[in-house]
Amino acid sequence: MPEGKIIKALSGFYYVLDGHQIIQCRGRGVFRKNKITPLVGDSVVYQAENEREGYIMEVYERKNELIRPPIANVDQAILVFSAKEPDFSSILLDRFLVIIESNEINPIICITKMDLLTDEERLKLSDYVNDYRKIGYEITLSSSKTEEGLDKLLPHIKGKISVFAGQSGVGKSSLLNAIKPDLELKTSHISSHLGRGKHTTRHVELIDIENGLVADTPGFSALEFDTLEAEYLSNCFPEMAALRNDCKFRGCLHLNEPKCAVKDAVANEEIPRYRYDHYLQFLQEIKDRKPRY
């Protein structure tokens, strides 16, 4: 049977790319029975009914997957955050980073709308940028309007499967339109009343850009740590994970334990205080999470 990759999922149909042709497929009932939902990015086996239609018969094992946005087998996540409108949020960025790190996906941070900042605001933002770069994160500063930073972002896209993700209204679709103008993706302005953007992207779809596949995804403003365990959380903070073996106690949660290398690093300003505060907040959320049955 032929094989391909799902590049779009919409209204119960899965669009499978096989070479240069796209087959519109439905999932067989066995998927519903086994509680398997095909995702964009899945490598699948399909049975063709004709040249344009068919059924997905099998979904190959995934190397990773995300729930929101629903996508599988990505090489990297480009986390798009605006410098302004809405204002840059380090705690929201850290939420995204934890989710991406927990799925063992390589994150790249892209801060958009740099053209909206004053010199003073740029200087303030640079403190955060320097912190995240010191941790080891790749960061690009960009503007869809002035095309600042697009040349630095493009090399990351080539030959990779990337998911663009971020809060609504940060300019993901505008950024992709600036990179590839013929996409003509819908965009929306920020609501002055709510201070956030509308969801202009309604579904997940892989788009061919620079010989890579890029997923433009629906934006969202909340992330829960549904499956992440408290003991694993610090592994999603690279600067804390690097000190794991220096703590006195194995399994140290970096709370009240004596001779904790992470707390020492925070005290010595080697780890940003806000990153540690975010870790503590996330840890408490995980501990307060209702048990799953």
Image: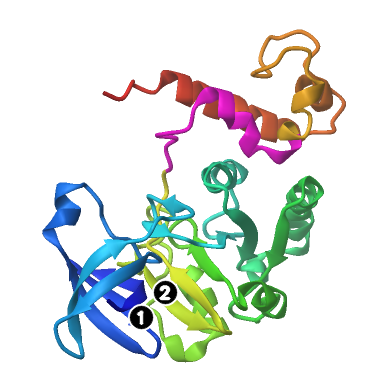
Image quarter hosting the C terminus: top left
* Residue 281 in view, yes or no: no
The CA distance from mark 1 to mark 2 is 10 Å
Magenta stretch containing residue 51, yes or no? no
Relative to residue 73, is residue 109 drawn left or right?
right
Mark nearer the viewer, 1 or 2: 1
Say which label, 1 or 2, has the lower sequence index: 1
Amino acid at dot 2: Leu
Which residue is the extreme one toward the right? Answer: 268
Mark 1 residue element: strand
* Left or right, residue 178 beside residue 256: left
In front: 17, or 247? 17
Q: Position of residue 103 (x, y in %)?
A: 52, 46
Residue highlighted by disc 1: 17
Q: Are marks 1 and 2 in contact (CB under 8 Å)?
A: yes
Q: Which residue is mark 2?
A: 206
Indicate which disc residue 82 carries.
Answer: none
In the image, which residues are magenta? 223-239
What residue is shown at x 52% (from left), y 56% (from top)? 86
In the rendered structure, does residue 230 fall within the stretch colored magenta? yes
Residue 206 lies, with reference to residue 138, above or below; the image says below
Q: Position of residue 179 (x, y in %)?
A: 57, 83
Q: Position of residue 148 (x, y in %)?
A: 70, 77
Residue placed at 25% from the left, 51% from the top?
36
The residue depicted at 41 percent of the width and 86 percent of the height is 184
Which residue is found at the position 25% from the left and 82% from the top?
23
Looking at the rendered structure, the kind of residue marked 1 is Leu
The image quadrant where one finds the N terminus is: bottom left
Q: Choose top left, top right, bottom left or bottom right for residue 70.
A: bottom left
> What secondary structure is marked by label 2?
strand
